[in-house]
Image: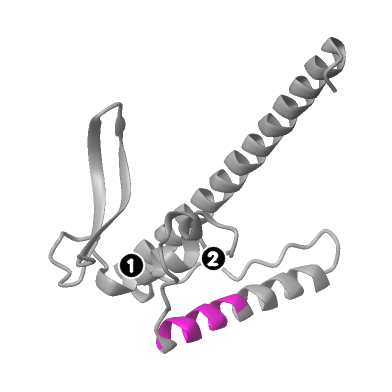
């Protein structure tokens, strides 16, 4: 248990295609990022206490100290870029450029792709939860209106 994880799957009805697996021994293909991929999935897809994982009984999955350091460095770099962009004179756009392809490893590209997918996952889950709450509120209002109409409220 816990040696292999499916973190992405596509398909229609009961026909599934393009599964992305992470495994402890990193034996599941080019996209298998091993334990690191598992940690990144858990850390990015359900970071809040009100997320899906607690509801499913999935425990908190800690990043390694190195991953926490990288995440902090990345967040600090994003803050610096945002601050620099805000300080730029109006009408001027600051563009630092993209790193040369040779300097960006395939692993970093995959990691960015995983983080982007996780952000979309989190956004979609929040929207679904919000929609469910609105449906619940409408249902309660409808029930109350029926009770009031029938003299039962």
Question: Magenta stretch: residue 7 in it?
Answer: no
Q: Which mark is residue 38?
A: 1
Instruction: Give above or below for 150 relative to 139.
Output: above
Quarter of the rendering occupied by the C terminus: top right
Q: Which residue is mark 2?
A: 47
- Residue 88 point in image, percent of width and height: 80, 70
Q: Residue at x 74, y 27 (%)?
A: 138
- Residue 43 point in image, percent of width and height: 46, 68
- Residue 91 point in image, percent of width and height: 82, 58
Quarter of the rendering occupied by the N terminus: bottom left
Q: Is residue 10 left or right of residue 60?
A: left
Q: Is residue 11 left or right of residue 23?
A: right
Helix, strand or loop for disc 2: loop
For the stretch drawn in magenta, what is the main secondary structure? helix
Tell which circle, 1 or 2, labels the residue nearer the N-terminal end. Answer: 1
* Mark pair 1, 2: CA separation: 13 Å
Q: Which stretch appears magenta? A: 66-75
Q: Which mark is residue 135?
A: none
Helix, strand or loop for disc 1: helix
Q: Residue at x 46, y 58 (%)?
A: 53
Residue 79 vs residue 60, the one in the foreground? 60
How many other residues sit within 10 Å of disc 1, few (<14), some (14-19) or many (≥20)?
many
Q: Residue at x 33, y 68 (%)?
A: 37
């Amino acid at each position: 248990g816990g040696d292999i994880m499916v973190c992405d799957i596509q398909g229609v009805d009961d026909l599934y295609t393009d599964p992305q697996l992470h495994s402890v021994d990193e034996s599941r293909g080019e996209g298998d990022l091993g334990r690191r991929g598992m940690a990144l999935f858990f850390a990015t897809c359900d970071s809040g206490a009100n997320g899906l994982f607690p509801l499913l009984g999935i425990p908190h999955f800690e990043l390694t100290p190195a991953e926490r350091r990288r995440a902090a460095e990345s967040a600090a770099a994003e803050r610096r870029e945002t601050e620099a962009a805000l300080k730029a004179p109006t009408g001027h756009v600051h563009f630092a450029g993209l790193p040369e392809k040779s300097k960006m490893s395939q692993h970093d590209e995959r990691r960015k792709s995983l983080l982007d997918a996780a952000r979309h996952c989190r956004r979609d889950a929040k929207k679904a939860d919000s929609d469910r709450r609105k449906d619940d509120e409408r249902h309660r209002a409808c029930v109350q209106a029926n009770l009031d109409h029938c003299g039962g409220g």
